[in-house]
Image (cartoon, rainbow, N blue to C red):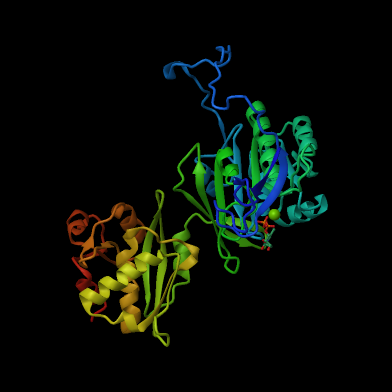
Amino acid sequence: MKSSFLCTNCGNITSKWFGRCPECGEWNTLEEQEQIPQPAKGIKQNKVKSFAPAESSKAFKIRDITYSNNLRISTGIGELDRVLGGGLVEGSVVLISGEPGIGKSTLLLQLCQSIDASATLLYVTGEESVSQIKLRADRVGVDSERLFVLNETNIGRIIAEIKAVNPAVAIVDSIQTMFDEDYPSAPGTVTQVKQSALHLINIAKESGISIILVGHVNKDGAVAGPKVLEHMVDAVLYFEGDKQQTYRILRAVKNRYGSTNEIGVFEMGDAGLREIENPSELMLEQRPKGVSGNCAVCILEGTRPIISDIQALSTPTVFPSPRRMASGFDYNRLSLLLAVLEKRLGLRFSTQDIYINVAGGLKADDTSCDAAASLALISSLKDAPVPENLMVIGEVGLSGEIRSVFGIEQRINEAARLGFTQIALPFKAVGKCKGKYSGVEFIPVRSVFDLLKLLGI
Ligand code: TYD
Ligand code: MG
């Protein structure tokens, strides 16, 4: 018998204690765990067993496999359906995670109301009492006759109740509060999270009940507990957003039944979460006008174009090495753009602190936002506002050239719909777009020099 140590963050097992987990790098997460029996001496460990062919382990020809088409249940929340890839798949297990207070419980409670009225639902809560749930339900207008609420953390009893109620969808809020009484460790530990999830996944697959798990996040923003939890479930959704702001973005990071490109946008209000079908309009409402350093940008989230504002601020530095800070924008990309602008246009960014931010908590992390970010940077440095109705699309190369990007047409459509009258495009793309949109002037930009012209410099 030999003791082993388990990392409570990533589930890594080591034979020695370390102050810092060698796998995930977290400090002070290794805990001694129950002793694991070692194989008796004399048994050859790497001997390959010969398995007799079992009846059930039969391979099928892919052509002979059939499935029923009617597998998805619409949640009644369009933005959630979009992220799930068209609705909840029967018998699937979805993990929704996000920071405390972001609105996971609210979203799932609202789902209980909006989902098909004939579906029975079970909301299991390990965090709040049933009366707290009722209070919230009254607040967001949830009054479904077929919704059951259970306050329990013992996974065995939860499974029994799921079997008794036999709901179409069961919600477990949250997986970190659940425990299996066969294991001595405390709820929230790797073993308990894994075991509880296993039980729930088994019942989902056996019975066709869809299960939604709520998961907490650790300080880095990833799902707390073992990474293996993310491997076990069918879909992992992250609910993110700035708690100070009212927008919330739901993003799929894994989805066995759909794309992970789509996002759902919500707004938190007095009566719970409201879907935002036209996020661009909302983002543009709050644009500052006539101020330098702001440039409209069109981000493609999956198939969905969203217009937001990219904001740059450049101020003379007081530090020996100037500060650079990027939020919603890639830090390395920012350094690259600054280097290109400094070299090609001779702009002295090296004496400036630079801050860059994408409004609304969106992420502009593909290269199609380069030109807009560069324009915002130049605009802030020169204190020359970008024209309000101008949108610029393109990638910036190391020689300062502006290159074409994917999804130009979708971006132009969205910009034209929202009243942008000037669209600056890579030279080659202009030819394709000219004449297709009335009231939109296309300005060709070949290199970062042309960006200066857009600002009238
Ligand atoms: P909640 O769903 O409890 O978050 P989570 O389950 O992710 O921890 O959301 C709680 C926050 O949302 C809380 O700070 C209050 C706010 N809220 C509203 O602003 N309006 C509402 O109608 C509700 C129900 C909550
Ligand atoms: Mg909650």
Q: Is residue 398 left or right of residue 241?
A: left
Q: Is residue 92 left or right of residue 174?
A: left
In front here: 52 or 302? Answer: 52
Residue 368 image point, x, y percent: 32, 59
Residue 176 image point, x, y percent: 70, 49
Q: Is residue 286 left or right of residue 160?
A: left
Query: Which residue lies at the image location 32% right of the left edge and 65% below the top edge?
Result: 370
Residue 291 in view (yes/no): no
For residue 316, above or below residue 278? below
Query: Which residue lies at the image location 58% right of the left edge and 25% below the top edge?
Result: 44
Ligand 1's quadrant: bottom right
Q: Quadrant of the C terminus?
A: bottom left
Residue 423 image point, x, y percent: 27, 65
Q: Quadrant of residue 240?
A: bottom right
Residue 348 image point, x, y percent: 29, 82
In front here: 45 or 64? Answer: 45
In front here: 274 or 87? Answer: 87
Q: Quadrant of the N terminus?
A: top right
Residue 370 in view (yes/no): yes
Query: Which residue lies at the image location 72% right of the left edge and 40% below the top edge?
Result: 35
Looking at the rendered structure, the number of numbered marks drawn on it comes to: 0
For residue 46, above or below residue 406? above
Q: Is residue 326 left or right of residue 351?
A: right
In front here: 417 or 243? Answer: 243
Q: Residue furthest front?
A: 42
